[in-house]
Image: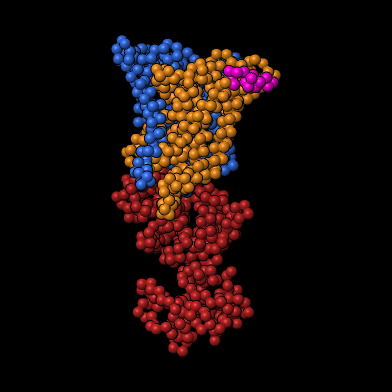
Chain colours: A red, B blue, C orange
């Protein structure tokens, strides 16, 4: 049984369509991330789920319950806002206790549950601090505690780490992941950061221009993207344009002008012989190979443990290659190849 | 060379003409008034003693304070929901409502007060409506008493309460209201626990503005009030123009000024003095 | 939902309360009788003829215009220079200067009127145009300085540094860069100064004497005794001018934004 089901949910503002009719199921206890660039409709979807935005069409089910017309305050969802939205005139304890007071929980139980929630987010001893007196990371954790303490049916998070610096963001990502694994709770998470999505999620839904393009585990999206957009959005990619020479449904070959051999790879759905397509060759799969394609190294970019090489092939085609630092070939001339099993042939997303 | 000199003298040279004007037309007259207040031949402090002890004058002080408090309370109570409606109105309506608040500020207080004289007369339109509507049996006395003063002053000072409250309301992050709603709070609870407390600084600023302006208000009480509702500013006018008693007039002015400045010092937390000018 | 409707209805009612009463003087100005009854039983424009024909009203109108123009001419350059000076001050000096400049706004106008009257009387200046002009300029000064100050604060300080880097002298900098950019603020301040003076009642009642009565002083005196619809004409005239000023100020502010 799915915990949250979007059934044909769509949203228009006048003539502008923010969200095309969308079907999406979130399993009970699953951490699902909505990933996409700004304007892709991910926050619209989240706000519809929370009840802050009425959908223009479709139905929203939580468990067996149709909540499409239920006001936000009766949905029992915990929301963590991008700005945290902590009440500035209340201290940490009062912020976390707010949802419990609304639910008329007895005072002694409020004290116990707030203390427990603060312990979970490692803020014991901060109960009487003013919000102003907290760092960004601490405020983020108070917001999380406030959302969790009401035991929500669904936890919603709208780019909650956007305001943190890079180092702290990485720590909090792992912390949220560990908390989720320790006590799985149906979670919808919105971000435009692909790394964040890959670190934290059970599954990722990639969105573009108001539609969900592909849903799957991080691994599946990375290895077998549905199209060039998803490939480009997750990780680094070489996308080589050409024409489909042949396909049997599971594999395909792509002829590329100026290359001596066609590129073979597994076929994404929606390919037909003779159609324009792209081959996805991840830079880390490009390797030196004696007797392979001759190429010239025109640029070296040192990224710490990795060195990225920009290669130019005989026909002027450019490819990026990533090697562990120290294993990158010296000199200018090089012969390269790649593992056909890691190549995908994808429809060319316009 | 000349440039550098101007640069060094800069601020002082630029401020000098305005400061000179204020020195002659603002500071000097106030000092002269202070001096006059101690010039009674019967003894320097006599006017102050008389003002502060005579029951007639004490009644005037009480009436002045009462009018100021009443006007402040009414403008805030009316202004808050109006500011709330303003903050929530769709853009087109907000423009219209804003024009309704701001345009009267440009029209002379004298003209606005005169309008009320025409409306509140015994046989004026307001009374005729009340009688025709069966609300009262005979026309009410709305003019030349405290009722008239309150109506006129609330009308003139209402925008000064609305604008700071509106500013405070739109400063409240809408995500806070969503957060409250998402945590299960009813609209009433969200208003009482989140929006109202967070907009209180605007209420304090607006209330302080109105109180400050009410204390020294002259035109409206003088035209709409009567012998039964004399305020301090009317008393001062009477001392100068009817009784020609300068020491008393000067002392009463100093008391009004002191009360104004004392309130300003107390309210400095809510009202930057410059903001008083800015609202207009 | 019901709450929303109630709130909107309340707002509409209060907006009407703010605007409609002010308009009461307009029908009163077109009354045919010699007393005012709203709405008038018979209409006529005869009192407009009286207003523009009667020498005492005409003198008052001209005096108001004369005083307002002169007060504006005093307040605008002084206020603009002061705003430029204030913008360069820091710390305690700035706070003191600001306190002095908002003084005329904070001190009750009846106190200012009595104080000025006392000084003007001993200097023999009661009933002179000069006394009115200086008094009004003092009241208008804060508004001019504030308006110009708002424009100045919106200026990009890098502009000044850029011009100075190109070798502009400070006068040239002011003339070619600062002034054109703050001009809307200066003009807005001038509109404000003119209206402040034109509408001013209390100082004028004390300082005008018998010889320098402005329009508001004439209205004030009529209202306090027995008035005819000609007062409503004068009030309507003042209101029309104020709305014109408000509209032009709004236009200027939009240009500035």
Instruction: Pinpoint residue C165: horizontal percent, then vertical percent.
Output: 41, 54
The outermost residue toward the front is B1
- Secondary structure predominantly adopted by residues drawn in magenta: helix
In the displayed structure image, the side of residue C70 where residue C41 appears, left or right: right
Residue at figure coordinates x 57%, y 82% from the top left: A257
Residues C24 and C225: in front is: C225
In the displayed structure image, the side of residue A192 where residue B127 appears, left or right: right
Instruction: Pinpoint residue A308: horizontal percent, then vertical percent.
Output: 42, 75
Residue at figure coordinates x 51%, y 49% from the top left: A72
Residue at figure coordinates x 47%, y 86% from the top left: A294
Residue at figure coordinates x 45%, y 27% from the top left: C134
Indicate whether B44 appears above or below B76.
Answer: above
Residues A91 and C212: in front is: C212
Magenta segment includes C49: yes
- From this viewpoint, is residue C113 visible? yes
Magenta segment includes B266: no
Instruction: Pinpoint residue C187: horizontal percent, then vertical percent.
Output: 51, 38
Indicate whether B134 appears above or below A153.
Answer: above
Instruction: Report the span colored magenta.
Output: C44-58
């Amino acid at each position: 049984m799915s915990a949250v089901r979007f059934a044909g949910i769509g949203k228009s503002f006048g003539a502008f369509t923010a969200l095309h009719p969308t079907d999406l199921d979130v399993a009970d206890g699953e951490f699902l991330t909505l990933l996409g660039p700004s304007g892709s409709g991910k926050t619209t979807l989240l706000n519809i789920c929370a009840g802050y935005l009425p959908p223009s069409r479709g139905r929203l089910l939580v468990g067996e319950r149709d909540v499409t017309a239920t006001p936000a305050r009766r949905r029992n969802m915990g929301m963590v806002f991008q700005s945290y939205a902590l009440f500035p005139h209340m201290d940490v304890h009062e912020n976390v206790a707010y949802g419990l007071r609304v639910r008329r929980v007895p005072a002694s139980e409020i004290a116990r549950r707030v203390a427990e929630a603060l312990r979970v987010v490692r803020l014991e001893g901060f109960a009487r601090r003013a919000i102003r007196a907290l760092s960004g990371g601490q405020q983020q954790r108070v917001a999380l505690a406030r959302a969790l303490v009401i035991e929500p049916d669904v936890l919603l998070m709208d780019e909650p780490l956007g305001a943190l610096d890079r180092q702290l963001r990485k720590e909090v990502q792992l912390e949220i992941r560990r908390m989720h694994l320790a006590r799985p709770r149906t979670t919808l998470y919105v971000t435009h950061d692909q790394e964040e999505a890959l670190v934290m999620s059970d599954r990722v839904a990639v969105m573009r221009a108001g539609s969900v393009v592909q849903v799957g585990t991080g691994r599946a999206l990375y290895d077998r993207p549905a199209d060039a957009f998803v490939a480009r959005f997750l990780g680094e990619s070489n996308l080589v344009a050409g024409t489909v020479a042949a396909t049997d449904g599971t594999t395909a070959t792509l002829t590329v002008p100026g290359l001596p051999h066609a590129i073979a790879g597994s076929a994404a759905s929606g390919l037909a012989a003779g159609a324009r397509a792209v081959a996805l060759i991840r830079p880390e799969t490009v390797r030196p190979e004696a007797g392979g394609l001759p190429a010239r190294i025109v640029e070296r970019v040192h990224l710490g443990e990795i060195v990225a090489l920009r290669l130019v092939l005989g026909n002027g085609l450019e490819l990026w290659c990533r090697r562990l630092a120290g294993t990158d070939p010296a000199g200018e001339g090089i012969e390269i190849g790649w593992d056909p099993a890691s190549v995908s042939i994808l429809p060319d997303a316009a | 060379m000349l440039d550098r000199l101007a640069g060094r003298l800069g601020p002082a040279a630029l401020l000098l003409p305005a400061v000179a004007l204020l020195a002659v037309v603002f500071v000097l007259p106030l000092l002269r008034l202070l001096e006059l207040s101690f010039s009674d031949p019967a003894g320097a402090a006599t006017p102050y003693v008389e003002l502060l002890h005579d029951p007639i004058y004490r009644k005037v002080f009480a009436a002045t304070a009462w009018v100021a408090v009443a006007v402040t309370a009414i403008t805030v109570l009316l202004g808050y929901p109006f500011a709330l409606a303003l903050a929530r109105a769709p853009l087109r309506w907000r423009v219209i409502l804003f024009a309704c608040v701001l345009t009267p500020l440009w029209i002379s207080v004298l003209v606005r007060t005169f309008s009320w004289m025409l409306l509140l007369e015994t046989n004026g339109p307001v009374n005729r409506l009340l009688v025709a509507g069966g609300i009262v049996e005979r026309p009410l006395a709305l003019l030349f008493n405290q009722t008239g003063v309150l109506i006129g002053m609330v009308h003139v000072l209402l925008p000064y309460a609305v604008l700071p409250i509106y500013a405070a309301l739109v400063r409240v992050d809408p995500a806070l209201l969503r957060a409250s709603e998402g945590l299960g709070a009813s609209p009433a609870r969200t208003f009482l626990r989140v929006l109202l407390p967070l907009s209180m600084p605007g209420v304090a600023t607006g209330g302080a503005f109105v109180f400050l302006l009410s204390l020294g208000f002259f035109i409206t009480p003088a035209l709409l009030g009567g012998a039964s509702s004399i305020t301090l500013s009317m008393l001062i006018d009477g001392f100068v123009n009817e009784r020609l008693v300068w020491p008393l007039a000067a002392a009463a002015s100093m008391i009004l000024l002191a009360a104004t400045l004392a309130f300003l010092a107390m309210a400095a937390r809510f009202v930057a003095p410059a903001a008083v000018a800015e609202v207009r | 939902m019901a709450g929303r409707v109630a709130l909107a209805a309340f707002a509409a009612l209060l907006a009407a309360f703010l605007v409609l009463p002010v308009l009461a003087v307009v029908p009163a100005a077109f009354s045919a009788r010699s007393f005012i009854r709203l709405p008038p039983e018979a209409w006529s424009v005869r009192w407009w003829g009286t207003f523009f024909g009667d020498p005492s009203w005409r003198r008052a109108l001209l005096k108001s215009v004369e005083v307002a123009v002169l007060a504006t001419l005093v307040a605008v350059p002084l206020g603009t220079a002061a705003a430029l000076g204030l913008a360069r001050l820091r710390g305690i000096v700035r706070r003191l200067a600001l306190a002095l400049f908002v003084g005329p706004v904070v001190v009750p106008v009846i106190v200012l009127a009595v104080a000025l009257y006392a000084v003007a009387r001993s200097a023999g200046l009661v009933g002179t145009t000069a006394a009115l002009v200086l008094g009004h300029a003092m009241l208008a000064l804060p508004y001019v300085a504030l308006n110009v100050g708002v424009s100045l604060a919106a200026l990009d300080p890098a502009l000044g540094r850029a011009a100075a880097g190109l070798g502009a002298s400070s006068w040239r900098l002011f003339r070619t860069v600062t002034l054109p950019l703050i001009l809307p603020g200066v003009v807005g301040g001038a509109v404000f100064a003119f209206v402040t003076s034109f509408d001013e009642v209390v100082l004028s009642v004390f300082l005008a004497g018998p010889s320098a009565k402005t329009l508001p002083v004439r209205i004030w005196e009529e209202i306090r005794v027995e008035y005819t619809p000609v007062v409503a004409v004068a009030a309507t005239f003042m209101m029309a001018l104020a709305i014109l000023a408000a509209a032009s100020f709004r236009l200027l502010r939009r240009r500035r934004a």
